[in-house]
Image (tube, rainbow, N blue to C red):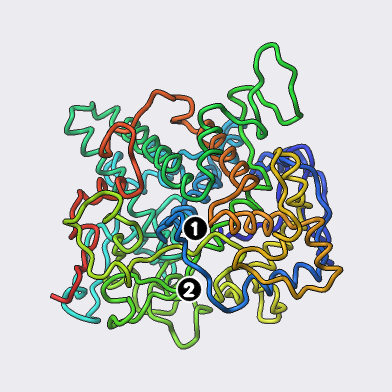
Amino acid sequence: MRHIRKHYMVVGEGMLSRDEAGKPVCYRAPSNVELREFRFSRLGPKGKPASDALCLALGEAMTKPGNQPDAKDPIIPAGFTYLGQFVDHDMTFDRTELAFGSPVTVEELVQARSPALDLDCLYGRGPGDPEDRMLYSDGVRLKMGKTAAVPFPDGGTNRDIDGYDLPRSGQGATPSARRAALIADPRNDENLIVGQTHLAMMRFHNRVVEKLAAAGTPSHDLFERAREQTTKHYQWMLRHDFLDRICSPGIVDEVFSKGRKYFEVPCQPGTTPASYMQILPGDAPTMPIEFSVAAYRLGHSMIRGAYQWNRVFKAGGPGGVGTLDLLFRFSGTSGTLSPPPPAGLDDRDAGTFERLPTNWVADFRRLYNFENETDRKDLGFPNPDAEFNMAKRIDTLLVDPLKTLPIGSFGGNPSSPPNDRNLAFRNLVRGNMVELASGQQMAKLLNATPLAAGKIIEGAGGADVTNLDAALKKELTDNTPLWFYILREAELNNGRLGDVGSRIVAETFHRAMEASRYSIVRDPTWRPSLGPDASTFRMTDLLLFAFEGKKDLLNPLGDAAP
C-alpha cells in the first residue's frame, strides 16, 4: 500500500518485473492471477533500457541540493501536489480488497482493477456492503474523526475538534491498530496533506447530502444522488482546474472536446481500427505504463521540503515549519501521529497520540489560493507572500529529502545501497524494468516535435547534466528516459507538461472519467451547480462548499493565539 510495485501486469504481454540482477523479465501469469492484478497496458513501443551509469548520473543530478524554483507561470498552489496523489489513489484503488472472502464476480473483479475517477477510494463498495458500512455514520454520510487536545502551544490547540481528523479504529491491542484510519484506502493516511485532502472530500460529500436532503430527495435515493453529484463536481474540478494547471491547456481542450487520438480509442462504425489498442465502448479500461511509470510521476518534482502549515507550524511560529518528515510522522499509515520518538519510526507502536493532535490541523488557505481566485477577502490571510505554499515547478529537480527515502517507504533494509533510497534513481530503474519507450519514441508516436539534443542537455534551470561524459550525453540525447524527458519538456514549457506529457496525462484522465460509474465525459451536458456559476467549479469552490464558506472552518486554529 506504500507505492511499492514490484511488477506490472501489462495486458497482452504478461507480468513485467526484474530478476535478481535488476534486469527486466516478463513471464506469463495464469488467467486467474491476471484477473487479480491491476490492469496496465503499453501505449508506445518498447524502448532500450538506460544504462546503470546514466541512471546513477541522472538520479544524482536531479536530487542535488540547491535552488528548486517555485511554480510561478502557471501558479500552482501546493495543495495540488497532494490532490494529485489523492487522484492517483482513486485511479488505482482496488475496492475488491475490502471484500476478502466475499463473492466477487469476474466483471466486478476486472472493473475493480481498472482505472476510474469515481471516488472509490472514498466510498469503497458503498454503505450497503457488509464490510464497508463501517465507513458511514448513518448509511449515507461518511464518518469523520475528532482531533486530540494538545497543550502546545496554547489554549487554542488544547481542545478536541470534531470533523478534523480521519475516523480512527480506536480498537486493538496496540497503538498502531488503534490509530488505523477507518477509510477505504489506507494510502490516504500516509502523509498529513493527503489525509487532510481525503477529509475535505468526505466533508464535501456530507455537505452535498445535507443540500439534497433539504431539497426533499427521498431517503432511499439520497446516497446515490449525493455520490453522483460529488463525483461529477470532482471530475469537473479535475478537468478544468487541476489538468489546466499541470498540462498544456490546448491539448486538454482538444482531448475533452474531440476525444482521444492515441489511447484506447473507441471504434467508430465503418472504420478500420488504427491500432491494436482500439476498444469498444463499455470495455474495461487499462492504465498506460507510460502514465504510471513516467508522466504522472510529475508530482515528485512538485514536492516541497517544508510547508507553512498553520499558525503553529510555520517559519517564526512556535513549532517551526512543517517539514516533509513531520508531515509523514503525523499520519497513521507512515507515522505515529506523535512527535518524533528517539528511536525514529521503526517502532510503529511508539508515540503518545492515537488521534491527530489538534495543533496539526491544516489551514487550507495556505495550500489553495482563495484570495485571488474567489475574491473572498473575508477569508483573510496574515502574510500571503511569506506564508502561502506554492508547489515546486514541474521540472527535472527533486527536493533534497527525496534523495534519502526512509527505508520503510520502499521495503528496503539497513544494508540497502544508498542509491536505492534516491527517488529519482528508483523512478529511472522502474522505467527500465518495464522497458519504457524513450522520450523520442513517444514524441514520434504522438506526432510531437522532439526536443533538440541541446535542450535536453541544457534544460532551463533544472538538473545540470552538462558535465556528463560524451558517451553518456549521447545516450541521453539519443534515447532519453521517458520520465526525465517529460520533466525536461515541462521545464522548457514554464512548468507545464509539454506535448508528450500533456497528451499522455490528458488521454488517461479522459479514459478514467469515461469509465467511471458517474461520468462528465459520458454526460457532456452536465454542469456544476455548487460553484459561482454553471461553468465554474475549482478546488477552492469545493473547499468553500465543504467548509461552508467560513474562515473559522477552513482554518479552525485561527491566525493568532487566543
Query: Where the C terminus falls, by quadrant?
Result: bottom left
Whether residue 407 is visible here, answered yes or no, is no
Kind of element beneath mark 1: helix
- Is residue 469 depicted above or below 282 in this figure? below
Which is nearer the eye, 291 or 183? 291
* Residue at x 19%, y 68% (from the top left corner): 558
* Residue at x 75%, y 75% (from the top left corner): 467
Outermost residue toward the right? Answer: 471
Which is nearer the eye, 104 or 538? 538
Residue 281 falls in which quadrant of the image?
top right
Q: Which residue is mark 2?
A: 305
Query: Where the N terminus falls, by quadrant?
Result: bottom right
Which is nearer the eye, 118 or 52? 52
Kindly report the distance in space between the C-alpha atoms of the residues bearing marks 1 and 2: 20 Å
For the image shown, how many numbered marks are present on the structure?
2
Kind of element beneath mark 2: loop
Q: Which residue is mark 1?
A: 187
Mark 2 neighbour density, 10 Å: few (under 14) some (14–19) many (20 or more) = some
Which is nearer the eye, 412 or 204? 204
Whether residue 239 is visible here, answered yes or no, is yes
Query: How far across and down, in percent of the image, does residue 148 sit?
Result: 26, 70
Outermost residue toward the left? Answer: 562
Classify residue 9 as left or right of residue 550: right
